[in-house]
Image: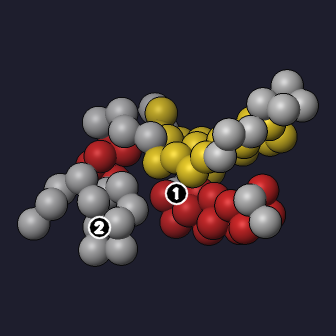
Amino acid sequence: MDKFRTKSGRLTPYALACGYIERKETKTRRLELWHEGACFHVKAHDFAEHCRLFWESFQTLGEARRYFDTQARAVFQ
């Protein structure tokens, strides 16, 4: 059993606690999910426009993943 990836290819809570970052990106945009302290962060940048699109924090990994997935569809459509 891989302790860093789930069956669906996502990072496990253990991997996130170890400092790994779940990331989706193109040449101009990047979306990240990571764990820090007592919360999970989801952040997106637009490098073409030189701005941060959003940065949200969540108490649970489930909430963070739902937001990450929703934003991935919106940011990379």
Q: Which residue ends up furthest to the left in the rendered image? A: 1
Quadrant where the C terminus lies?
Answer: bottom right
Q: Determine whether the residue tagged by mark 1 lies in a helix, strand or loop.
A: loop
Residue 51 visible here? no
Q: Position of residue 26 (x, y in %)?
A: 65, 46
Q: Is residue 51 left or right of residue 72?
A: right
Looking at this view, is 65 or 59 the one in front? Answer: 65
Residue at 56% of width from left, 62% of height from top? 65
Q: Is residue 10 left or right of residue 31?
A: left
Residue 6: which numbered mark, if any?
2
Q: Is residue 1 left or right of residue 53?
A: left
> Which scheme is used to colour this image of the protein?
secondary structure
Cα distance in 3D space between marks 2 and 1: 17 Å
Amino acid type, residue under disc 2 in the picture: Thr
Q: Which residue ends up furthest to the front in the rendered image? A: 27
Amino acid type, residue under disc 1 in the picture: Thr
Q: Which residue ends up furthest to the bottom in the rendered image? A: 7
Residue at 80% of width from left, 37% of height from top? 46
Q: Position of residue 45 (x, y in %)?
A: 75, 36
Q: Position of residue 44 (x, y in %)?
A: 72, 41
Looking at this view, is 53 or 66 the one in front? Answer: 53
Q: On the image, which quarter does residue 57 sit in?
A: top right
Q: What residue does disc 1 label?
A: 60
Q: Is residue 72 above or below residue 59?
A: below
Q: Is residue 50 above or below residue 56?
A: above
Quadrant where the N terminus lies?
Answer: bottom left
Residue at 29% of width from left, 67% of height from top? 6
Of the two numbered discs 2 and 1 in the rendering, the one whose residue sits closer to the viewer = 2
